[in-house]
Image (cartoon, rainbow, N blue to C red):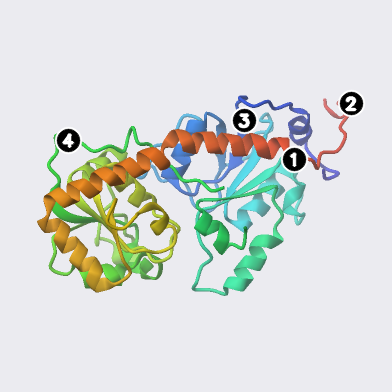
Amino acid sequence: MTANATRRSIRSLMRKVRRGDRLNIFTFATHERYEENLCHTGHNFYSFKHGKEWDSAYAQVPSNYHIISSVPESVNFDLVLSHTSCIRLRVAHDLLSHTTNCPANKVSVPIIRHCHVLPDIRFDIQKELAEFKSIPVDCNSFISDFNRKNWGYVESDNGVDTEFWVPDASVEKEPVCLSVVNEWPSRDWCCGFKLWQQTSQGLPTRVWGKCTGSTAGFSQPASGREHLRQIYQGSRIFYNTSLHSPVPTVLMEAMACGCAIVSTATCMIPEIIEHGKNGLISNDPHELRAFVEMLLENKDLANQLGNEARKTICEQYNLQSFVDNWNNLFYDTIENYRDVPEVSNENIS
């Protein structure tokens, strides 16, 4: 611990955490619906405003997720949870220790770095990997095993609330090809916008997602989770053209809502979708278009694939499993945290 550690830091060190206790977790806003699921663990999350801020268009802020612009001295933090960003790890250290330019692992509570993304292929990947490993943390967590291997590490987690993301048997799924992507035209490199244009031309398509700047007006975001659920429920096909993403959350939500999936076979997607059983996948543009056309014509096949897609999410990627795995990770990280100096009661006032 640094020489000028705060009283809060000392109290955090003295705090005896047992499994089942409600933890105080210092974090930053990253991915609203993923973090919404994290809040089902029941812990208190204190999200410091730095860079991206929570966008309520994607999910409402849960009652146990507290957005803060300064660090409350009264809170004894048990963990730091940073989603990938190296900069945020440094910010967390500086804020919690009241020091600057110190190693990130010298905060007086353990640090978990959870990685949602892959190394950015637009830049020097080797440099990215070196920087990633240069910042010490107490635990690395990854959204998928594919993601883990790409960052050079040899369990990972993703999950969907299958009680919320559900089909609606009273709603007829329209023969349309749905895609949900934010800022799609400007993210061709990772989201396959040109591939979508090439393979969907002339077909009945439906696109939702926030677009700003020069592409404002191309598509609009859903007004909220309930609206997005209705969009999934009313669409026969969900078409995903992602090129460089472990697995889009919207893909798994659409599966849970019983959409028939047509997707690129990239990154983690072949781990979730078995071609011909719970979706149709390929990296060939001609095959992708043929799959979409086939499902537009064959309602029964689309329903069969949609039912299998939901079954996959319910059995393998359900919210309870997600919550249990995260709680085990939280408590394991605290229990395995060994770099704790002796602290006497006289340091606390």
Amino acid type, residue under disc 4 in the picture: Ala
Front tag of 2 and 1:
1
Q: Which residue is mark 4?
A: 169
The answer to whether residue 109 is seen in the rendering is: yes
Local crowd size for mark 3, using a 10 Å CA cut-off: few (<14), some (14–19), many (≥20):
many
The span from disc 4 to disc 2 (Cα, nearest Å) is 65 Å
Secondary structure under the numbered disc 3 in the rendered image: loop
Q: Which residue is mark 2?
A: 346
Residue 68 higher or lower than 120, as above or below: above
Amino acid type, residue under disc 1 in the picture: Tyr
The span from disc 3 to disc 4 (Cα, nearest Å) is 40 Å
Q: Which mark is residue 337?
A: 1
Amino acid type, residue under disc 3 in the picture: Leu
Residue contact at pointers 4 and 1, CB within 8 angstroms: no
Q: Mark 4 or mark 2, which has the lower sequence index?
A: 4
Local crowd size for mark 4, using a 10 Å CA cut-off: few (<14), some (14–19), many (≥20):
few
The span from disc 1 to disc 3 (Cα, nearest Å) is 15 Å
